[in-house]
Image (tube, rainbow, N blue to C red):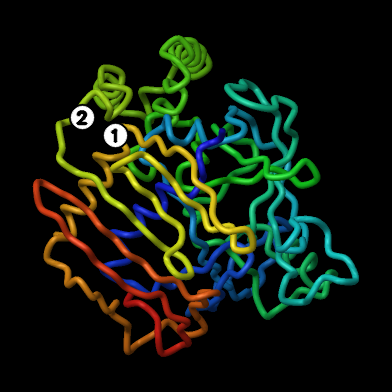
Amino acid sequence: MKKLSYLLFLLLILAMFLISACGQSAQIGNSAMAPIDNNTTVPSATNATTVVQYLEMEASYRPYFSAKGLIEEADAVFIGKVTKISFQVLDLTTALPPTEETMDRHLSLHTIYDVDVEVSYKGDSSIKQIRQMGGIKDLYIEEQVSVLKNANAWKGGIPTLEAMKENIELGQTYLFAVGLFDETVLPTFYFPEQSIYNMHNPFEEHYNNLTAKSVISAFGQDKWDTYWHKWKTDNPDWETWIDKDAVDRALTAENSISDDIISIDFNFILKYGVGAKNMINTFNGTYRKDLITTSTEETELHLTDEDMQEIYKKMKAINILNYPSDYNPPYSDNPKPGVERHVEPNQTYILELAIDGVTKRITWVDLNCSDTCVSPE
């Protein structure tokens, strides 16, 4: 049974949530938009000069603690060259072209990347295209505006995804980790900051220190050795843009934090959802899901030692034992314009933990928030 995609994400955001509880992000499909402060004047792909406003979309993603966690969750992991970049307006609720039934607020610009797969490590090796919600900053401006207007989806600017920290470039080769959520739609990224690696430097660190090397090595040291030999052959002058000493250190480093696991005294129960019916319990290794209409269902839960250590570190970092038992999340008096938080339905959270011989119980509630109820920057 595939590991439930959001279990560890709940625990990771727990540490952040207790500091700034009412986040500025929204789930994919209900993304918040806020205009960037300044208009940007840049050349488009047609070499014309266009003034455009960007509408930034913030979306919640589940980050991964290790390369192993990423490749276990991803449906396909491969190295491919980007051969074409195009744009299409899709229905957010289906990830398919809009129909007459599609509501205007569900019309969303997507970037489509054509790729030629060079090496496949997992999943379908025949993938030809990848989609990503949002457009691209500073490039292809006229093309994006035209697509939006032709689909009657123009809202005064080009929507871009905040999580896309860097543009995927035409002609570049990348390591991609993607999800195949439905056979009828194009694959997409689980978490852009950990799912897109420019192979110009396979040692460049991404979120949680993941690198292309660590992801490939997670499939076996032989996979990395094979690719590294090919990469050096294809890039004989690589030392002119990558520090050799840093590469030597990376090549001798451990492939996983699991080799550095320390003994910890830590377990927890996290209950959440309407009536706190969902539950993650590491004491007995179970996960309970509220099925809404048909009671609940319980299954086994297996968190690795490295997963537990990472969660333990997050709890220690925020000094979880000093939080009040009845916690009231902080709200900002200076919200970001145009951003709202909607939690439907409202959720109750109950965290019971045993850490370093001490037990603690903390409760709090998710609230629907308007512009006056947004977490600090």
Q: In the picture, residue 252 is in which quadrant?
A: top left
Residue corresponding to mark 2? 261
Q: Which mark is residue 206?
A: none
Residue in the picture at 71% in, 29% down: 116
Q: Secondary structure at mark 2?
A: loop
Q: Residues within 10 Å of mark 2 (few under 14, many from 20)?
A: some
Judge by depth and name the residue closer to the eye, 248 or 133. Answer: 133
Residue found at x 82% / y 75%: 152
Task: Give me the C-alpha separation between circle 1 and circle 2.
Answer: 6 Å
Q: Residue 306: which disc?
A: 1
* Depth order, front residue of 372/194: 372
Q: Amino acid at mark 2?
A: Ile
Task: Kindly identify the amino acid type of the residue bearing the numbered disc 1.
Answer: Glu
User: Which element is circle 1 on?
Assistant: helix
**Which image quadrant is residue 352 in?**
bottom left
The percent position of residue 41, horizontal first and vertical second, equals 58, 71
Between 368 and 332, the one lying in front of the other is 368
User: Which image quadrant: the N terminus?
Assistant: top right
Furthest toward the left, the residue is 357
Chain-order first, disc 1 or disc 2: 2
Relative image position of residue 276 (x, y in whole percent):
42, 65
Quadrant location of the C terminus in the rendered image:
bottom left
